[in-house]
Amino acid sequence: MRGNLALVFCLYATSALATMPLLSEQPSEKSAPACEQWAKAQDDDALEMWGVQDSGRASREVGLNRLKNFCMSGEKSEIVGFGSSAGFDAAYCRKHKTSRLCR
């Protein structure tokens, strides 16, 4: 009984953690118009996560621009993913101690 209770608790606690939203499949053509359309097709959770700024606020426009750039280059800003897990947040804040988001 005690083992089952521990398992239920672990599953419950794990399900409460935030994760990076999944993105749809990127376009095969890596052009600015194709990547812009792809970015606009992402859901609100993805746009919020990709639009997070040092202030802690998320900007839809920043999210769209970061997604478009990611589609074109494969590179993403270090802050993308903040709030996705406690481990990610702690690692980010160790590197960015002066960020308002980390205070």
Image (spheres, rainbow, N blue to C red):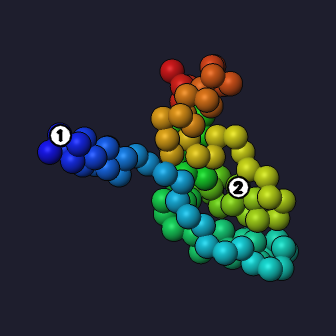
Identify the residue under disc 2. Answer: 66
- Tell me which numbered mark, 2 or 1, is placed earlier along the sequence: 1
Q: How far separated are the C-alphas under marks 2 and 1?
A: 47 Å
- Residue located 55% across and 28% down the image: 90
Secondary structure beneath label 1: helix
Identify the residue under disc 1. Answer: 2
Task: State left or right for residue 17 relative to residue 58.
Answer: left
- Residue located 71% across and 73% down the image: 26
Q: Is residue 66 above or below residue 9?
A: below
The residue under label 1 is which amino acid type? Arg
Secondary structure beneath label 2: helix
Looking at the picture, how far across and down is residue 95, in whole percent? Answer: 68, 24
Residue 88: quadrant of the picture = top right
Mark 2 crowdedness (10 Å alpha carbons): few <14, some 14-19, many ≥20: many
The residue under label 2 is which amino acid type? Arg
- Residue located 49% across and 41% down the image: 85
Looking at the picture, how far across and down is residue 6, in whole percent? Answer: 25, 41
Task: State left or right for residue 32 relative to residue 101.
Answer: right
- Residue located 72% across and 45% down the image: 77
Image quadrant where one finds the N terminus: top left
Residue 55: quadrant of the picture = top right
Q: Is residue 103 above or below residue 87?
A: above
Task: State left or right for residue 10 relative to residue 98.
Answer: left
Task: State left or right for residue 88 relative to residue 76.
Answer: left
Mark 1 crowdedness (10 Å alpha carbons): few <14, some 14-19, many ≥20: few
> Camera-side residue: 92 or 16?
16
> In the rendered image, is residue 25 in sight?
yes
> Camera-side residue: 5 or 64?
5
Give yes or no for contact between labels 2 and 1 (Cβ–Cβ under 8 Å). Answer: no
